[in-house]
Image (cartoon, grey):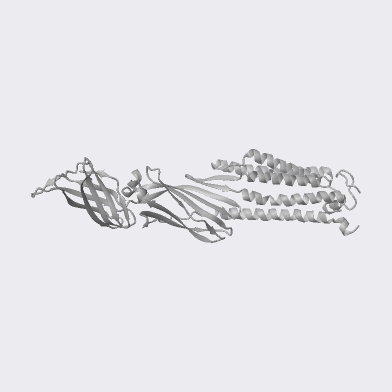
Amino acid sequence: MSPTWGYGPSPSGTRLPPLRTRLLLGLLLLLASIAVTVGAPAYLLHLLGEGHGYSSVNDLQIVVGGTVVSILSTAAYVARPTRAFGPLSAARSAALILYLTLLASNATLTIPLGGASTATVTYSGMLLALSVVPLLWLMSALLVTLSDIWDPVARLRIDFPV
Amino acid sequence: MTSSRRYPISLRLGQILRILGTLLLVAFLIYVGSAVYYASKLEAPSGATPIVSVVSGNAFEVSSSYNLTDPGPYSISGLTVESHLNLPNSSVIIESLTPPVSLSGYGTAQVTLSFRIPLDQLTGSARSLLVNSTSLPTEIWVNASYAHLAGISIFTEAEYAWGAPFSGFALAFQPPTTEPNGTRAIGVTLGFQDLAPIPVDGVFAINLPLSTGGSCVTFHWPVAVASGSVYSEEATVYLPSGCSPDGGYYLASWSGSGFQTALPPGSGP
């Protein structure tokens, strides 16, 4: 059976969640993702600023980067029963790699320690090391994309068994 | 339908990579979280008492040793301390850079910060360090790599309390008198306090110049003063025939305790 785009009847051996359910859960995922990728870093930057600290990463970079990654993550989740899942997951991972790499080029925190003392923390190495995670996810997404082309139903039977 | 048909190798590999990435993310977050936790436990080393010594090359060396302790399992590598000691009213900056030190997890290491103050290079107002005890502004940069994740650079300023070996050095001259045999003499009082943490044991050479240039008289004044002690003695200086020390200032130099140096000029008779 040729895979539906998630909107038709479930292939044999699978039970695909209805689109409405996926959209609803996707919305929750989007909110949670934005809270983690945008809200938390922005709040930490706010705390840093209140303590007269300084970050070379600004709010705009975090809002744009975090929102793009969150939207792509949500889109991949909603499209999971479809062929679009692989490419969207790959796009999400690539966006995350790009986001981390851009942040790493400018990842410096300056924290006042009282008096004239300051601490400067450079964490670009940490972000580059972290980008190994989306790199693995990207490779996974590409393999899923290939698998979906070759045998579209196989993944659905694993991800959405009866 | 065969098992291989249902679970193609590319799909299996993709799943493995996805799970591996997720596990790596969890491990990474735990690693970073615990590294931040232990970093918050790092304490600044307590202030060590500086040791002042005279070293070869006619210099004072001020050194302070600090014991550093890594409170966590993550290494601190490439730790260096760079510092600048600013001499008073002077552009002279004494620089110090420690060799890189690495601490393994829960390890300790000692960092020794030392400034070498070459007395020969103390010119102008910087020479007042020999006779004025003062606070010297110090800038310190500590650089290190922590847990193979982040580079940390800490900047701070401090004041180093400098104790001058001839603190308050002063010569007081009484009016010249004439001895019964016609020789002219001047009563001189020498006073200072040794506030350096080393004794001073040597000889001052004090020269009273003429207003026209040249020297009227040079006399030598041996002293031996323990660290922290006050010295105050009187002596009589006999002037050569026909010489009047009217230059209005004196020049003093020191030789002893392992160093030689000129002192700032002072008001003469």
- Where B52 sits versus B243, above or below? below
Residue visible at 37% across and 44% down in the picture: B88
In the image, taking residue B266 as reference, residue B37 lies left or right, namely right
> Percent from the top left, x then y, of residue B213?
23, 42
Residue visible at 43% across and 54% down in the picture: B114
| Residue furthest out toward the left | B180
The quadrant the N terminus of chain B occupies is bottom right
> Percent from the top left, x then y, of residue B18?
75, 53
| Residue furthest out toward the top | A60
- Where B112 sits versus B208, above or below? below
> Percent from the top left, x then y, of residue B257?
31, 57
Q: Is residue B78 visible?
A: yes
In the image, taking residue B164 as reference, residue B175 lies left or right, namely left
Pick the residue in front: B155 or B245.
B245
- Where B109 sits versus B151, above or below? below
The quadrant the C terminus of chain B occupies is top left
> Percent from the top left, x then y, of residue B184?
13, 47
The tally of labels here is 0
Q: Quadrant of residue B37?
A: bottom right
Q: Is residue A15 visible?
A: no
Pick the residue in front: A43 or A108.
A108
